[in-house]
Image: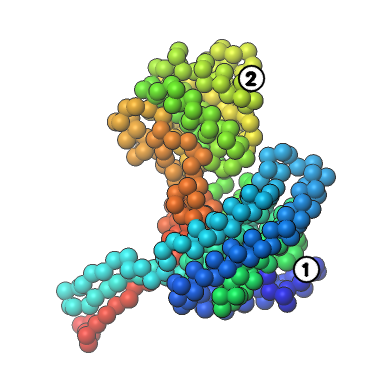
Amino acid sequence: MSESLKVISGSDDIAALMHDIGRRARIAARALAIAPEETKTRALNEAAAALRADKAAILAANAEDVAEARRNGQAASYIDRLALDEGRVEAIAAAVEAVAALPDPVGRTLATFTRPNGLVIERVATPLGVVGVIFESRPNVTADAGALCLKAGNAAILRTGSDSFRSASAIAAAMARGIAAAGLPAEAVQLVPTREREAVGLMLGGLGGNIDVIVPRGGKSLVARVQAEARVPVFAHLDGICHVYVHAAADLAMAKTIVLNAKMRRTGICGAAETLLVDRACAATHLAPLVTMLLDAGCAVRGDAATQAVDARVTPASEEDWRTEYLDAIIAVRVVDGLDDAMAHIDTYGSHHTESILTEDAAAAARFLAEVDSAIVMHNASTQFADGGEFGFGAEIGIATGRMHARGPVGVEQLTSFNYRVHGSGQTRP
């Protein structure tokens, strides 16, 4: 964070501050767009080293954030997303290094073709410019977003929620110091130094044309506001209502392993399974073991009549349960009449995020992967793999469920656009 930026309040001061941040980001973006790959790589490795060097300060800041969140009565799942320990700080630094090691996405020739008149036309990857990221309780987003944007030649303006303000500030300060040590502008990654909500509205307005795209990372109310009010393009998902469908030809042992992981590995992430669909054709052998396993693992089950019949601990599912992203140890379970019924349920209630089919039937899997309209569709795998790091992207700036060029985990390649470069030899148009 630039030393000239201070924590302030007051509408006039905030507007002036935010527009200054936007101006600085645009200047930094111009430098980043032409920065050599080795310079960007060095900057990110220096940032990772600074994060490790500042571990004690980052953990101390995070401890204050966590204590405040506990006093405010935040849920355990929320605290889990907010809290850092030595292992998580190391994982943040390692993720920055992983992004540094990725191939440079800028300058790639995406296509080349020659017209009958001899013009040679290239489509070449270019940075987006300035990316605004608005997020809530995950401090690691500060480093992930900053690193991904920088690798793709973009400047980042980051606005964290109040609960993670101290943690994000410490992380951003370390990132900026590392970036500057490599000779790139410290303003390549700027954290908005105020908790005032007015700053969000100013970012959604584009800061006088200085923000090119917005990425929200947080709860439904935040994302809904961003999608409703933003005057620049948005990469986002509103809900992570992820489904696991146990097809008639599913292997029970595999299904138990995957379902337990998909729901319970980390219940508070957007890739956690929220609805389990079991094919009626295998319900007699698969439903009870799966439901009992989840209940015994401490997961509440809300089910349809068939699911309630297998265990007295199952509570009735309402219509709203099929549309709910619990982000907790709760799952909705329903018996469906085959593949078409399962896909119809997902189409009706899903959020176009991540869905998985468990089956040994290759034809059924092929139909599911081709016909389900979600950003990520899986076969015989846990929905918890819906993550940029797991996709080999180093990290992600978010999951996009829209139909723009960025869909699924948004990594460095998705943070580029392109232009056309036309090479002539004197041609004129008749």
Across and down, in percent, residue 76 comes to: 72, 38
**Residue 308 appears in view:** yes
If you read the primary sequence from the N terminus, does the residue marked by circle 2 or circle 1 appear first? 1
Which residue is situated farthest in the bottom direction here? Answer: 426
Kindly give the residue lying farthest to the left in the view shown: 116
- Circles 2, 1 touching at the beta carbon (< 8 Å): no
| The C terminus - image quarter | bottom left
Q: Relative to 289, is 21 on the left or the right?
A: right
Placement of the N terminus among the 4 image quadrants: bottom right
Residue count near mark 2 (Cα–Cα under 10 Å), binned few <14, some 14–19, many ≥20: some
Q: Quadrant of residue 135?
A: bottom right
* 397 relative to 157, above or below: above
Going by the image, does 118 lie left or right of 374? left
Residue closer to the observer: 171 or 231: 171
Furthest residue toward right: 71
Q: Would you identify the image quadrant in which residue 291 lies?
A: top right
Q: Is residue 304 visible?
A: no
Q: Which mark is residue 294?
A: none
Position of residue 17 in the picture relative to residue 30 (left or right): right
- Its colouring scheme is rainbow
* Residue shown at the point (68%, 74%) measured from the top left: 2
The residue that mark 2 highlights is: 315
Indicate the position of residue 382 as horizontal and vertical percent values: 48, 36
- Which residue is identified by label 1? 7
Mark 2 and mark 1: span between their CA atoms? 48 Å
